[in-house]
Amino acid sequence: MNNSEQLRIVSLLPSATEIVASLGLTDALVGRSHECDYPPEVQKLPVCTQARINAEKPSATIHQDVTQLVQSALSIYEIKLDVLEELQPTHILTQDQCDICAVSVADVETAVAKLTNSHPQVISLQPQTLADVWTDIQKVGVALNVSTESVIKNLEARVKICEQKTQSLLDKDRPKVLCVEWIEPLMVASNWIPEMVKIAGGKPLFSVIGQPSPKLTWETVFNTNPDIIIFMPCGFDLDRTRQEVMSLTQQPEWENLQAVQKARVYLTDGNAYFNRPGPRLAESVEILADILHPETFQYGYQNQAWQQL
Protein backbone atom coordinates (compact mmCIF):
# COMPACT_ATOMS: atom_id res chain seq x y z
CA MET A 1 0.00 0.00 0.00
CA ASN A 2 1.49 3.38 -0.96
CA ASN A 3 1.40 6.54 1.12
CA SER A 4 -1.53 8.15 -0.71
CA GLU A 5 -3.73 5.06 -0.18
CA GLN A 6 -3.32 5.33 3.58
CA LEU A 7 -4.00 9.07 3.67
CA ARG A 8 -7.47 10.57 3.73
CA ILE A 9 -7.00 14.33 3.46
CA VAL A 10 -9.68 16.99 3.84
CA SER A 11 -8.54 20.46 2.77
CA LEU A 12 -10.62 23.40 4.00
CA LEU A 13 -8.40 25.93 2.27
CA PRO A 14 -7.95 26.47 -1.50
CA SER A 15 -4.21 27.15 -1.22
CA ALA A 16 -3.73 24.00 0.90
CA THR A 17 -5.58 21.95 -1.71
CA GLU A 18 -3.16 23.28 -4.32
CA ILE A 19 -0.19 22.45 -2.06
CA VAL A 20 -1.42 18.86 -1.64
CA ALA A 21 -1.85 18.56 -5.43
CA SER A 22 1.63 19.97 -6.10
CA LEU A 23 3.04 17.23 -3.84
CA GLY A 24 1.39 14.55 -5.98
CA LEU A 25 -1.31 13.67 -3.45
CA THR A 26 -4.48 14.73 -5.29
CA ASP A 27 -5.74 11.13 -5.10
CA ALA A 28 -5.49 11.23 -1.30
CA LEU A 29 -7.93 14.16 -1.05
CA VAL A 30 -11.37 12.98 0.11
CA GLY A 31 -13.04 16.32 0.92
CA ARG A 32 -12.69 20.04 0.28
CA SER A 33 -14.04 23.47 1.18
CA HIS A 34 -16.77 25.11 -0.91
CA GLU A 35 -14.06 27.39 -2.37
CA CYS A 36 -11.51 24.75 -3.38
CA ASP A 37 -11.64 24.62 -7.17
CA TYR A 38 -8.08 23.91 -8.36
CA PRO A 39 -6.82 21.64 -9.75
CA PRO A 40 -10.18 21.12 -11.55
CA GLU A 41 -10.49 17.44 -10.59
CA VAL A 42 -10.98 18.36 -6.89
CA GLN A 43 -14.35 19.89 -7.75
CA LYS A 44 -15.95 16.44 -7.71
CA LEU A 45 -15.00 15.90 -4.03
CA PRO A 46 -17.54 16.21 -1.20
CA VAL A 47 -17.87 19.78 0.12
CA CYS A 48 -17.26 20.13 3.86
CA THR A 49 -17.98 23.83 4.44
CA GLN A 50 -20.50 26.51 3.54
CA ALA A 51 -20.53 30.30 3.87
CA ARG A 52 -23.03 32.30 5.90
CA ILE A 53 -22.70 35.15 3.39
CA ASN A 54 -23.63 35.47 -0.28
CA ALA A 55 -20.39 35.99 -2.21
CA GLU A 56 -22.33 37.04 -5.32
CA LYS A 57 -23.33 40.35 -3.72
CA PRO A 58 -21.42 43.60 -4.41
CA SER A 59 -18.18 44.09 -2.45
CA ALA A 60 -19.71 46.76 -0.17
CA THR A 61 -22.59 44.45 0.81
CA ILE A 62 -20.22 41.52 1.42
CA HIS A 63 -18.13 43.73 3.70
CA GLN A 64 -21.28 44.79 5.57
CA ASP A 65 -22.45 41.18 6.01
CA VAL A 66 -19.02 40.05 7.21
CA THR A 67 -18.83 42.94 9.71
CA GLN A 68 -22.25 42.05 11.14
CA LEU A 69 -21.28 38.38 11.59
CA VAL A 70 -18.00 39.29 13.27
CA GLN A 71 -19.75 41.76 15.60
CA SER A 72 -22.22 39.00 16.50
CA ALA A 73 -19.26 36.73 17.33
CA LEU A 74 -20.39 34.29 14.64
CA SER A 75 -18.09 32.46 12.25
CA ILE A 76 -18.43 33.41 8.59
CA TYR A 77 -18.20 29.74 7.60
CA GLU A 78 -19.88 26.57 8.83
CA ILE A 79 -18.30 23.12 8.86
CA LYS A 80 -20.54 20.28 7.76
CA LEU A 81 -19.87 17.90 10.64
CA ASP A 82 -21.93 15.07 9.13
CA VAL A 83 -19.83 15.12 5.95
CA LEU A 84 -16.58 15.12 7.96
CA GLU A 85 -17.84 12.24 10.07
CA GLU A 86 -18.59 10.20 6.98
CA LEU A 87 -15.24 10.94 5.29
CA GLN A 88 -13.14 9.79 8.30
CA PRO A 89 -10.12 11.94 7.40
CA THR A 90 -6.62 11.24 8.67
CA HIS A 91 -5.59 14.89 8.15
CA ILE A 92 -7.46 18.20 7.93
CA LEU A 93 -5.78 21.25 6.44
CA THR A 94 -6.90 24.70 7.58
CA GLN A 95 -5.46 28.14 8.35
CA ASP A 96 -4.88 30.57 11.17
CA GLN A 97 -4.22 33.68 9.11
CA CYS A 98 -7.56 35.27 8.29
CA ASP A 99 -10.99 34.38 9.71
CA ILE A 100 -12.64 36.19 6.79
CA CYS A 101 -10.79 34.22 4.10
CA ALA A 102 -11.55 30.66 5.22
CA VAL A 103 -12.58 28.41 8.11
CA SER A 104 -10.50 29.18 11.22
CA VAL A 105 -8.39 26.60 13.04
CA ALA A 106 -10.53 27.13 16.17
CA ASP A 107 -13.67 26.12 14.26
CA VAL A 108 -11.90 23.06 12.89
CA GLU A 109 -10.63 21.96 16.30
CA THR A 110 -14.14 22.35 17.73
CA ALA A 111 -15.53 20.18 14.92
CA VAL A 112 -12.79 17.55 15.25
CA ALA A 113 -13.52 17.19 18.98
CA LYS A 114 -17.04 16.10 18.05
CA LEU A 115 -15.98 13.38 15.58
CA THR A 116 -16.47 9.82 16.76
CA ASN A 117 -15.24 7.78 13.77
CA SER A 118 -11.86 9.46 13.27
CA HIS A 119 -9.18 11.47 15.05
CA PRO A 120 -7.55 13.48 12.26
CA GLN A 121 -4.38 15.52 12.60
CA VAL A 122 -5.13 19.23 12.07
CA ILE A 123 -2.48 21.07 10.03
CA SER A 124 -2.86 24.84 10.27
CA LEU A 125 -1.08 27.24 7.92
CA GLN A 126 -0.33 30.89 8.68
CA PRO A 127 1.71 32.49 5.89
CA GLN A 128 2.58 36.20 5.79
CA THR A 129 5.46 36.21 3.29
CA LEU A 130 6.71 34.13 0.34
CA ALA A 131 9.21 32.36 2.60
CA ASP A 132 6.32 31.44 4.91
CA VAL A 133 4.47 29.88 1.96
CA TRP A 134 7.46 27.71 1.05
CA THR A 135 7.76 26.76 4.76
CA ASP A 136 4.07 25.83 4.80
CA ILE A 137 4.59 23.55 1.80
CA GLN A 138 7.40 21.87 3.73
CA LYS A 139 5.18 21.62 6.82
CA VAL A 140 2.44 19.89 4.80
CA GLY A 141 5.01 17.54 3.26
CA VAL A 142 6.37 16.54 6.67
CA ALA A 143 2.86 15.91 8.04
CA LEU A 144 1.93 13.82 4.99
CA ASN A 145 5.31 12.07 4.80
CA VAL A 146 6.19 13.19 1.27
CA SER A 147 9.25 15.03 -0.07
CA THR A 148 8.84 18.72 -0.91
CA GLU A 149 12.39 19.50 -2.03
CA SER A 150 11.86 19.53 -5.81
CA VAL A 151 8.57 21.45 -5.58
CA ILE A 152 10.03 24.21 -3.40
CA LYS A 153 13.25 24.41 -5.46
CA ASN A 154 11.21 24.88 -8.64
CA LEU A 155 9.04 27.62 -7.11
CA GLU A 156 12.04 29.46 -5.65
CA ALA A 157 13.89 29.23 -8.98
CA ARG A 158 10.98 30.79 -10.90
CA VAL A 159 10.82 33.70 -8.46
CA LYS A 160 14.62 34.08 -8.60
CA ILE A 161 14.57 34.40 -12.40
CA CYS A 162 12.25 37.41 -12.11
CA GLU A 163 14.32 38.92 -9.32
CA GLN A 164 17.58 38.60 -11.26
CA LYS A 165 16.07 40.33 -14.30
CA THR A 166 14.81 43.31 -12.27
CA GLN A 167 17.52 43.77 -9.64
CA SER A 168 19.61 46.08 -11.85
CA LEU A 169 16.69 48.46 -12.48
CA LEU A 170 17.32 52.04 -11.42
CA ASP A 171 14.93 53.58 -8.90
CA LYS A 172 13.40 55.81 -11.60
CA ASP A 173 12.58 52.72 -13.67
CA ARG A 174 10.62 51.10 -10.85
CA PRO A 175 6.97 52.24 -11.13
CA LYS A 176 4.89 53.12 -8.06
CA VAL A 177 2.29 50.34 -7.86
CA LEU A 178 -1.03 50.27 -6.03
CA CYS A 179 -2.41 46.74 -5.59
CA VAL A 180 -6.07 46.71 -4.56
CA GLU A 181 -7.32 43.72 -2.56
CA TRP A 182 -10.85 44.96 -1.88
CA ILE A 183 -12.88 47.62 -3.65
CA GLU A 184 -15.48 48.89 -1.18
CA PRO A 185 -14.11 49.77 1.28
CA LEU A 186 -10.82 50.25 -0.54
CA MET A 187 -8.09 47.98 0.85
CA VAL A 188 -4.48 47.52 -0.21
CA ALA A 189 -3.11 44.04 -0.89
CA SER A 190 -0.43 43.28 1.69
CA ASN A 191 1.35 40.28 3.31
CA TRP A 192 3.27 38.63 0.42
CA ILE A 193 2.04 41.08 -2.29
CA PRO A 194 4.43 44.04 -1.68
CA GLU A 195 7.33 41.57 -1.63
CA MET A 196 6.19 40.19 -5.01
CA VAL A 197 5.83 43.70 -6.47
CA LYS A 198 9.44 44.46 -5.49
CA ILE A 199 10.67 41.21 -7.04
CA ALA A 200 8.78 42.05 -10.24
CA GLY A 201 10.48 45.46 -10.43
CA GLY A 202 7.99 47.84 -8.83
CA LYS A 203 7.61 50.03 -5.74
CA PRO A 204 4.58 48.89 -3.69
CA LEU A 205 2.45 51.71 -2.25
CA PHE A 206 0.71 51.81 1.16
CA SER A 207 1.60 48.25 2.18
CA VAL A 208 4.26 46.54 4.28
CA ILE A 209 5.64 43.05 3.67
CA GLY A 210 4.16 40.53 6.11
CA GLN A 211 1.54 42.95 7.46
CA PRO A 212 -2.29 42.84 7.13
CA SER A 213 -4.10 44.81 4.42
CA PRO A 214 -4.74 48.46 5.37
CA LYS A 215 -7.78 50.50 4.34
CA LEU A 216 -7.23 53.46 2.08
CA THR A 217 -9.19 56.50 0.92
CA TRP A 218 -9.53 57.48 -2.73
CA GLU A 219 -8.32 60.94 -1.74
CA THR A 220 -4.97 59.38 -0.74
CA VAL A 221 -4.84 57.46 -4.03
CA PHE A 222 -5.46 60.66 -6.04
CA ASN A 223 -2.87 62.59 -4.02
CA THR A 224 -0.22 59.86 -4.40
CA ASN A 225 -1.06 59.30 -8.08
CA PRO A 226 0.36 55.77 -8.67
CA ASP A 227 2.09 54.90 -11.95
CA ILE A 228 0.23 51.58 -12.08
CA ILE A 229 -2.96 50.32 -10.43
CA ILE A 230 -3.60 46.56 -10.23
CA PHE A 231 -6.92 45.19 -9.00
CA MET A 232 -6.75 41.74 -7.37
CA PRO A 233 -9.89 41.53 -5.19
CA CYS A 234 -10.01 38.60 -2.80
CA GLY A 235 -12.18 35.80 -4.17
CA PHE A 236 -13.02 37.50 -7.50
CA ASP A 237 -12.14 36.24 -10.98
CA LEU A 238 -11.44 38.50 -13.99
CA ASP A 239 -15.09 39.01 -15.00
CA ARG A 240 -16.24 39.74 -11.46
CA THR A 241 -13.34 42.15 -10.95
CA ARG A 242 -14.25 44.05 -14.11
CA GLN A 243 -17.87 44.37 -12.92
CA GLU A 244 -16.80 45.80 -9.56
CA VAL A 245 -14.17 48.16 -10.96
CA MET A 246 -16.49 49.78 -13.53
CA SER A 247 -18.23 51.73 -10.73
CA LEU A 248 -14.88 53.25 -9.73
CA THR A 249 -14.40 54.78 -13.15
CA GLN A 250 -17.25 57.17 -12.21
CA GLN A 251 -15.09 58.72 -9.47
CA PRO A 252 -14.73 62.46 -10.28
CA GLU A 253 -10.90 62.38 -10.22
CA TRP A 254 -10.54 59.00 -11.97
CA GLU A 255 -9.62 60.39 -15.39
CA ASN A 256 -6.91 62.57 -13.82
CA LEU A 257 -4.92 59.60 -12.50
CA GLN A 258 -1.73 59.11 -14.50
CA ALA A 259 -2.26 55.33 -14.40
CA VAL A 260 -5.60 55.89 -16.17
CA GLN A 261 -4.17 58.40 -18.66
CA LYS A 262 -1.30 56.06 -19.56
CA ALA A 263 -3.61 52.98 -19.76
CA ARG A 264 -1.76 51.31 -16.90
CA VAL A 265 -4.74 50.08 -14.90
CA TYR A 266 -4.99 46.29 -14.78
CA LEU A 267 -7.47 43.66 -13.67
CA THR A 268 -6.30 40.26 -12.44
CA ASP A 269 -7.83 36.97 -11.36
CA GLY A 270 -7.07 37.50 -7.69
CA ASN A 271 -9.00 34.39 -6.68
CA ALA A 272 -6.84 32.04 -8.73
CA TYR A 273 -3.51 33.70 -8.11
CA PHE A 274 -2.67 36.52 -5.69
CA ASN A 275 -5.08 35.69 -2.85
CA ARG A 276 -3.95 32.06 -2.50
CA PRO A 277 -0.70 31.56 -0.58
CA GLY A 278 0.27 28.35 -2.36
CA PRO A 279 2.29 27.16 -5.38
CA ARG A 280 0.62 29.56 -7.82
CA LEU A 281 2.26 32.54 -6.11
CA ALA A 282 5.26 31.80 -8.36
CA GLU A 283 2.96 32.36 -11.34
CA SER A 284 1.63 35.47 -9.62
CA VAL A 285 5.16 36.94 -9.51
CA GLU A 286 5.48 36.21 -13.23
CA ILE A 287 2.10 37.88 -13.88
CA LEU A 288 3.28 41.01 -12.03
CA ALA A 289 6.51 40.98 -14.05
CA ASP A 290 4.45 40.75 -17.28
CA ILE A 291 2.37 43.75 -16.20
CA LEU A 292 5.12 45.97 -14.76
CA HIS A 293 7.84 45.38 -17.35
CA PRO A 294 6.42 44.09 -20.64
CA GLU A 295 9.65 45.19 -22.34
CA THR A 296 11.52 42.49 -20.39
CA PHE A 297 8.95 39.79 -19.64
CA GLN A 298 6.55 37.94 -21.93
CA TYR A 299 5.20 35.05 -19.87
CA GLY A 300 1.95 35.05 -21.84
CA TYR A 301 -0.56 35.30 -19.00
CA GLN A 302 -2.53 38.16 -20.58
CA ASN A 303 -6.30 37.53 -20.93
CA GLN A 304 -6.02 34.29 -18.94
CA ALA A 305 -4.82 35.85 -15.67
CA TRP A 306 -4.84 39.61 -16.32
CA GLN A 307 -6.26 42.25 -18.62
CA GLN A 308 -5.95 45.96 -19.14
CA LEU A 309 -8.96 47.92 -17.97
Image (spheres, helix red, strand yellow):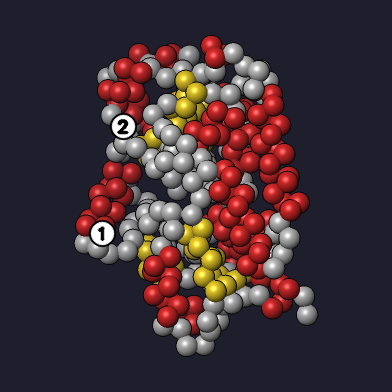
Left or right of 193 in this view: 145:
right
Q: CA distance from mark 2 to mark 1?
A: 23 Å
Left or right of 30 in this view: 296:
right
Q: Can residue 64 be seen by looking at this rendering?
A: yes
The type of residue carrying mark 2 is Leu
Q: Can residue 294 be seen by looking at this rendering?
A: no
Residue 91 in the image: above or below residue 280: below
* Secondary structure under the numbered disc 2 in the rendered image: loop
Residue under label 1:
69
The type of residue carrying mark 1 is Leu
Residue 143: percent from left, percent from top: 63, 67
| Residue sitting nearer the eye, 82 or 278 | 278
Q: Quadrant of residue 54?
A: bottom left
Which label's residue is closer to the chain start, 2 or 1? 1
Residue plotted at (43% across, 65% down): 105
Residue under label 2:
216
